Image (cartoon, rainbow, N blue to C red):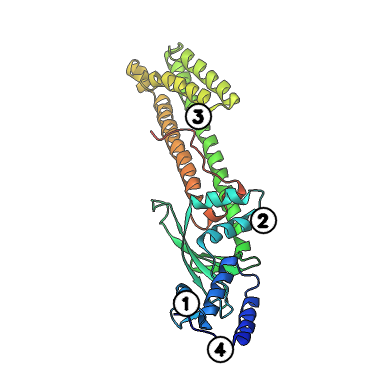
Amino acid sequence: MYARASRPHLYGRYLRARLMRTQGFSEEARMKTLLLTIAILGMVPASAGSGMLDRSNGTDSAVQGKAPGPSKDEIYFSLARRVNEQSDSPVSALVNALGEVIEVGDITLGDDGKATVIVKELSPSNARATNKSIRLVFAPAAEAKWKWESFEDNRRLYPVERLFPYAKDRLDRGRQMTVAAWAQYIDSMSRQGEAAAKVLETAKAILKSDPPQMNPLNLARASLDEAKKSGQVEVILSAYRELETAIEPVVTLGDNFSDLNANDAYLRLQGELKKSSDNHVAARKAYLDSVAAYNDDLRRLPFSLVAHGFEHTQIEAKIQPE
């Protein structure tokens, strides 16, 4: 049942005053304010605006002059706009990247008008990190937009300006570690060849003749050196497989020559050859671990909030775990 207004001129003045206070609100917020103000004046059923009532005191936040809180979509765009200020990445691309690594949860509007938002990692827990959520704080800005102000790390809030150099340094170092670990892995291949060559040189001195394994090993070492110059991963890996084949009979050389196993220098060098093989296995693992750690950082808070903006993306390992 609609109630008839007894003082339409006063109600009209009140309605205009309320609408003036919504300047800068979104069209949706202005419409909600209009409906609720009319409902308060008794001109339409109160149920028309009941969905927007604050159930704690029965009043509407827009009528009280409070801007409505940000939507979840606005949170993604607010984050993207802030990162865009520090990079050349388009906002739309940043929003898409954020949607792949975080989920926006509860949004709480404080008495100061700022919004505290819970964001959660989409990546599950693993051996390196536990899935977590952190708080972000946003302040209202012009045109119904919100500005990202601070982030949580180790239960403390920090200005978002501190995140950019902090995250960039961490991610830059992580990427550099993958490059260094790959170089060490390649170097470990050459060191295996060097260790095998020393075994054969000592065997030659003891046997007074060239071991039959010497020529294939020298050719394989030369092939690996050329492959490394090319920088092509498949070429390098193929050359290393040839080197491994050439090294295998060097390891068992003493089985055919008893004089070798009786020589301390030869046995010491065989031990170094085995150690070089173990170091190669360790270097392989270190490289794979460095790639996994870097990729994991890209999906962990707070680094995931800005990683894409600094052109940090997932790295595909050049080798696979054995």
Secondary structure of the residue carrying tag 3 is helix
Marks 4 and 1 in Cβ contact (< 8 Å): no
- In x, y percent, where is residue 221? 52, 20
N-terminal of the two: label 4 or label 3? Answer: 4
N-terminal of the two: label 2 or label 1? Answer: 1
- In x, y percent, where is residue 316? 49, 37
Q: Residue placed farthest to the bottom in the image? A: 6
Q: Residue at x 59, y 50 (%)?
A: 92
Q: Real-space Cα distance between discs 2 and 4?
A: 54 Å
* Within-10-Å neighbours for mark 3: few <14, some 14–19, many 20+: some
- In x, y percent, where is residue 172? 59, 48
Q: Nearer the viewer, mark 2 or mark 3?
A: 2
For disc 3, the marked residue is 191
For disc 4, the marked residue is 6
Q: Real-space Cα distance between discs 4 and 1?
A: 25 Å
Q: Mark on residue 53?
A: 1
Q: Is residue 227 left or right of residue 50?
A: right
Q: Real-space Cα distance between discs 2 and 1?
A: 37 Å
* Within-10-Å neighbours for mark 1: few <14, some 14–19, many 20+: some
Viewer-side residue, 161 vs 221: 161
Q: Nearer the viewer, mark 2 or mark 1?
A: 1
Q: Nearer the viewer, mark 1 or mark 3?
A: 1
* Circle 3: residue type: Arg
Q: Real-space Cα distance between discs 4 and 3?
A: 97 Å
